[in-house]
Image (cartoon, rainbow, N blue to C red):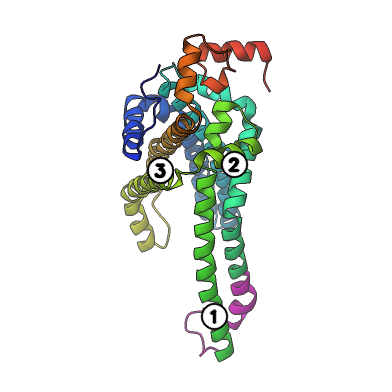
């Protein structure tokens, strides 16, 4: 029986997260490097296209390239980042249970179910953060349609119309309150759904079933999950500040235009940040998932009885199958 399958305190989960991250760094970073590498290539292509547009003095082309590049990058972040998170979650489950894991095996497990993971993340992001997007959109529409034509925000503008100023100030205050409320709502909903990806990958659940599973398992531990997420966010912001702060300062001094070598260097450092940080989230949330199953369902006892041959064999994915078991399962059942 795995000694780690027992109820863990928040401190023990954080220690276990650091231990797994350190001892399996090449595995987890290798999985995340696929995601980081895709973003790196796309960013370098965008930089090259922007430089070409600047060299040909194509102002409109520069705007078009920048907008299209941004949309493609966001799509890549959603798709590649989501798959890397699922693959890391699968790998964490294996190593946490003392089983073999590899980069290839993790991706082979989750790629046949790509649509399921993307649908899961679409649902959870929409439910959690759509109010925030709606508030931003409404405020931006007000600025563009009503405030901007009055040139209230233009530099060296004439004294503003009192009515326009009142509308602008009142809408800004309402916006801040609504934004704060939507952020709190988004965080609370994200905590409810924080264990959905582990439930989906480990138990092979469909998207909506995984969400319901996460809501049930996360009850009673959302405060601790929040602390883990906050710690990971602080680490991410710290690394981003260290690696990107210099480029931000230089960019501000040069009106947003960096020398080519600095732009390329910036993207390589962003690749390292993406590679190093993402496994922290996957490791911590997966450990919380197993901890909640131990606390609420006696998963440690279930594993012990299964190892002793006292229960019927469970589906390989539900028990965190080893690589060999997974390969046998996929050969027998085919891809979903």
Count of number-bearing discs: 3
Residue 137 is left or right of residue 22, and the answer is right
Nearer-N-terminus badge (3/1): 1
Disc marking residue 263: none
For label 1, the residue is: 170
Spot occupied by residue 302 in the image (x, y as percentages of width and height):
50, 20
For label 3, the residue is: 270
Whole-Å distance between the Cαs marked 3 and 1?
A: 39 Å
Write down the region rendered in magenta: 141-160
Front-most of 39 and 25?
Answer: 25
Front-most of 153 and 54?
Answer: 153
* Visible residue check, residue 108: no
Q: Is residue 203 magenta?
A: no
Q: Residue at x 42, y 48 (%)?
A: 223
- Tag 3's secondary structure? helix
Residue 74 is left or right of residue 30, and the answer is right
């Amino acid at each position: 029986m795995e000694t780690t399958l027992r109820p863990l305190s928040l401190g023990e989960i954080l220690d276990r997260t650091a231990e797994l991250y350190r001892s399996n760094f090449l595995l987890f970073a290798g999985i995340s490097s696929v995601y980081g590498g895709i973003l790196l290539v796309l960013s370098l292509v965008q930089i090259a296209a922007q430089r070409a547009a600047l060299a040909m003095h194509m102002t409109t082309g520069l705007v078009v390239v920048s907008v299209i590049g941004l949309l493609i990058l966001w799509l890549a972040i959603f798709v590649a980042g989501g798959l890397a998170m699922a693959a890391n979650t699968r790998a964490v489950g294996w190593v946490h249970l003392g089983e073999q894991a590899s980069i290839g095996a993790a991706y082979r497990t989750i790629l046949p179910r790509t649509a399921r993971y993307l649908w899961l993340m679409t649902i959870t992001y929409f439910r959690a953060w759509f109010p925030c997007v709606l508030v931003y959109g409404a405020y931006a529409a007000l600025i563009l349609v009503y405030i901007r034509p009055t040139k209230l925000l233009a530099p060296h503008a004439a004294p503003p119309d009192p009515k326009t100023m009142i509308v602008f100030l009142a809408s800004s205050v309402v916006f801040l309150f609504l934004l704060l409320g939507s952020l709190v709502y988004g965080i609370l909903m994200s905590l409810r759904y924080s264990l959905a990806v582990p439930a989906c990958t480990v138990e092979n659940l469909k998207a909506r079933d995984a969400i319901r599973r996460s809501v049930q398992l996360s009850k009673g531990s959302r405060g601790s999950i929040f602390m883990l997420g906050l710690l990971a966010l602080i680490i991410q912001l710290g690394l981003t500040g260290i690696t990107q702060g210099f480029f931000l300062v230089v960019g501000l001094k040069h009106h947003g235009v960096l020398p080519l070598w600095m732009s390329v260097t910036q993207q390589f450092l962003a690749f390292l940040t993406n590679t190093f940080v993402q496994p922290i989230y996957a490791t911590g949330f997966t450990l919380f998932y197993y901890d909640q199953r131990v606390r609420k369902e006696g998963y440690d006892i279930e594993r012990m009885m299964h190892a002793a041959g006292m229960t019927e064999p469970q589906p390989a994915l539900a028990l965190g199958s080893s690589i060999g078991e997974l390969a046998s399962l996929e050969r027998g059942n085919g891809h979903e």
